[in-house]
Amino acid sequence: MPSDTTKFGRRRVLISAAGAGTAALAGCIGTGDPDDDGDDTGDDDAAGDEMADQIDVWGWDVAANSLELTADAYMDEYDATVDVEEFGQDAMKEDLRSRLTAGSGAPDVAMLELIDGPADIGTGAIADITDRVDESGIEGDFVEGAWASLIEDDSIYAIPWDIGPTAVYYRRDVYDEHDLDADSIETWEDFQEEGEKLPDDVYMFNIPENDLDGVWRYQFRQLGNRPFTEDGEVNIHNDDSLMIAETLKQLYDSGIASTYDGWSTEWFNAYGEGEIASLPSAAWMEGTLRAELPDTAGNWGVYRIPAHEEGGPRASNWGGSSLMIPSQIDDAEANRAWDFVKWTLATDEMQLLMYDEYGLFPALETTYEQDDVFDEELDFYDGQAARRVFADVAEEMPEYQYSVDTPYVSDAINNHFLAMLRDDEDPEDTVMAAAEEVADRTDRDLA
Amino acid sequence: MATKRSSSSPERSSSVRDRLRWARQDISSVLPSLTFAQVAYVLISPFFFLFGLFLLFPVVYTIYLSFFRYEGVSGDTLFFIDFGPFFIEFPQIAELTFIGFGNYSRMLGDGLFWQSMYNTTYILLIQVPIMIGLALALALALNAGFVRFKGVFRTAVALPVSANIVAYSTIFLILFNETGFINYMLTQVGIEPVEWMRSEFWARKTIISAVTWRWTGYNMIILLAGLQTISTQLYEAAEIDGASRWEKFRYVTLPQLRPVLLFVVVLSTIGTFKLFAEPYVITGGGPTNATITIVQYIYEEAFVGSPNLGYASALTVVFVAIVSVISIIQIKLGGDD
Amino acid sequence: MREQRRKDAVWKFLTYSFIIVMTIGMMVPLYWMIVAATLPQEEFIRFPPRLYPGTEFFANFAVLHEETQFVISIWNSVFIAVVYTALSVILCSMAGFAFAKYEFRFKEPIFYLILATLVLPIQLLVIPLFLMMAQIDWTDTFRAIILPWLANPIGIFLMRQNMKSIPDALLESARMDGATEFQIFYRIALPAMRSSIAALAIILFLFQWDLFLYPLVILEDPGNYTIPVALSGLEESRRINYDQIMVASSLAIIPMAILFLVLQKQFVSGILAGSLKE
């Protein structure tokens, strides 16, 4: 910030106080652009390659910590300051949303969860970086399935960061003790059969009643579906959605599932004590298990998510995020911001550094070629090369388009699926009711 | 007492006091020229000054937005004012499409809007009477002449209001957890544990108890202050007439306290209508939207998912209108003149 | 006589019982919050719940101190709330006095307008207010947090209601003695309102103390954060650091407790009675 901002600011206070009262008298109110050097469009030629000396980067939790790593490395390499600010998750979303919609005060780079992609792009406050991406030719380096939520009308608005290829984590010791065979599980039916071998006080897995939409979404994606059709009609009551509802209800009714709230302390304890044998989740779960349940290291294994029908698809994605650049910042800042984003996300070194330190599974597909990383036999998994399982899933996972109306879908699925499980309601009525609720709230038609 | 304190340097402190008195007289000699009504305008003008400076724009902007569909951020200039050397530019904040009363008519068919209004009203109708009853009883008890350690009790009862909203919501979340303290106590006395968060009925009761816990002491303090502006002579007169405890309450306390009681009723009604943090943290609006409140709904329209600022503004306008009318009715019914 | 005394004793017993039951009810969740602040996170969600304090308070505080600049945040919150309360008490008493004791044009509509601003959900004002503050370069300042809410409708309303109980005769006799309207206000009305002003101060302090979304958006430097804003940083993506929040919240009670105890002295009966005596 130049040093004269305060003076400028103070002057503006005086003027607006005076101006508000007398503007009409002065009679020189105009509309439109007062000066034509417009600061928001056609910046490429005017901007040149000038780069700002300092940028602000926002993120939360582990993501902010890993950005600090890459920022340090960046500052060693280049003559610029990158300030990483760490927030709480909700706090950052609220703060960022306010600043984006107010058109000022946003950081130069910010974390954007894939699930929020379309909604935030819809604010019109995120810079279109298509030209920059094309110029640098990095689009093909990333997993194809990660882009969909970051692209709107063929324009790119953010670069994929980490993704969450799915798999079932299982406690090898518990499986062995009760003679369960992980290799024989191919479908959810097999999964249930194996689960029924367990005694009453050990559960095969957990159905988190507070996160049913997460469960539904990864399975819906696994089946290659998406909640809205090309024409924008609600499509969460189709056969695939119904199949998921039926599967979930059958597993719930069979009694092999516990129902702790996901991420609650009871839930962690149950996994720690081997009260629950398997955990369908995503690549990022490893980091959490290492940190929260250190005693269980070496007892885990992973296999692919079961299919709904024999021979069906077994790859999906759960979660993930990206980095974006707000459109309100000036060109020199945007240039620096882009340089930093490229450094952090499009280089194997940085992506692998963040994967190593914080378990953020890279969306950068070129990293998977590093056999020494991905084929390493890990002690945590009792010697299994688990990263290769995730990398294979990542390359296969179907594209998924989140939508601005994703929160409504989440709400509806959570509410109606919960009622289905608890109150024994019919799966077909359930998906229909959920679809109708979404249609009602978003002014859409049913497909 | 003043002489004792100023004994060390009587000269100086008295001259300071004199100077203050002169200054006051100077001011006073200017002021009496104001008429009776003008004084009133001077007294209320700071409110309008600050309101005009800071809140007028947001309020007008909200009403303005309620007639538009929000399409996204805009970088253009809306209009500028040119005073020669002074130049200010008002940015056009948003790309808007005029839709007239579109947002308002959408509200009519919006099930969740009605659901959230219903939830809020349900919570309000149970919570406000309980809380005010308790607060009034506490204020009377803690104002009674014979009660000792008043200060300690008053502070203890008022303290919940100082708990951070996230922290106390978390405490209630855990107290009412399926394996929480409340259920522990219930099982100790042989009652089946309750699934507080999972039933519509109990989730609302959880919210009600949390809000009542936090705000009862606050209202008690206000009522206590009100009780103390009642002239003791009125009680003395009543006693001479041989009035019973109930009669003193009925014919002295209640009529004298009416303005403050009315304040507490109106404030609590508005406060509970604006309920947001508690359901947001404790129940997340669930189960099945049974505890989502109107302000929570407005917040979600504006901040979660796509920013429907136009619709959120329309919801706000209607909400403010409804609650203001209810408050005015309360004030009229409360016999305020 | 003895009958009367027995009745009084029963009444006293009932009153005390009520007070004690309510006090316990109010203290249990607070007590538990403080217990939670002394436990490691796993332990305080355990079943059956643990009801006595542990030894982790300082360990939890150390983490809190590392994650946030909490001590500075307490200072910021206290500073903002105190300045705000002091200024706002004056403004609200003045306006409340005008509404209670003067006649002027549009008195009723103006009052209802003020009431309507009390209903406004702050959540929706945040974006336009931030925009204004950014325009005048006030972001990340305390004045941006304090000024917009100074003319607090709750305060005006409270003082209006309370000042109604000042007898008109009292003001009239002062006028007879040649007092100006302002002298009446600060010599008679304000002293008679001691307990109401104490209540007003608590209301205003608390209003500012609880603000979250607005300061979150306005404040940028973590060194300027207020307590609720600092606490929001403890929430990680999938779980909340309850133990630190409990430590922070337990500590944040202290300034409020001090405020209550200080203002406690103002809650005295019979001020008006004294001034009425001829």
Image: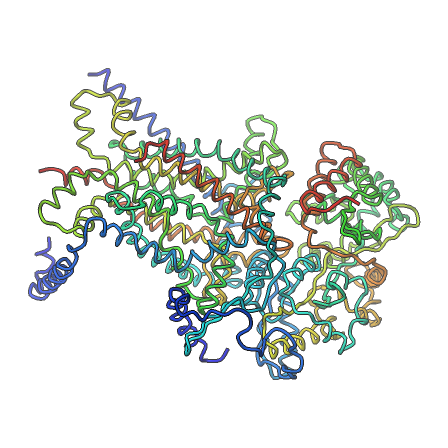
Q: How many numbered marks are there?
A: 0
Q: x and y percent of residue A429 in the render?
A: 77, 35
Q: How is the image coloured?
A: rainbow
- Comparing B206 with A33, the one in front is A33
Name the one closer to the observer, C53 or A260.
A260
Looking at the rendering, in which quadrant would you find the C terminus of chain A?
A: top right
Q: Which residue is drawn at 70% across and 72% down?
A: A129
Q: Report the front residue among B120 and B154.
A: B120
> Residue A162 at x, y = what percent?
73, 64
Looking at the image, the residue that sits furthest to the right is A311
Quadrant position of residue B114: top right
Answer with left or right where residue A33 lies relative to residue B254.
Answer: right
Front residue of this view, candidates A260 and B24:
B24
On the picture, is B154 further left or further right than C244? left
Give the left or right position of residue B45, taking residue A114 as reference: left
Measured from the top left, where is residue C22 in percent x and y?
A: 40, 34
Residue displayed at 23% across by 41% down? C268
Residue A267 visible (yes or no): no
Please tell me whether residue A46 is drawn above or below residue A250 in the rendered image. below
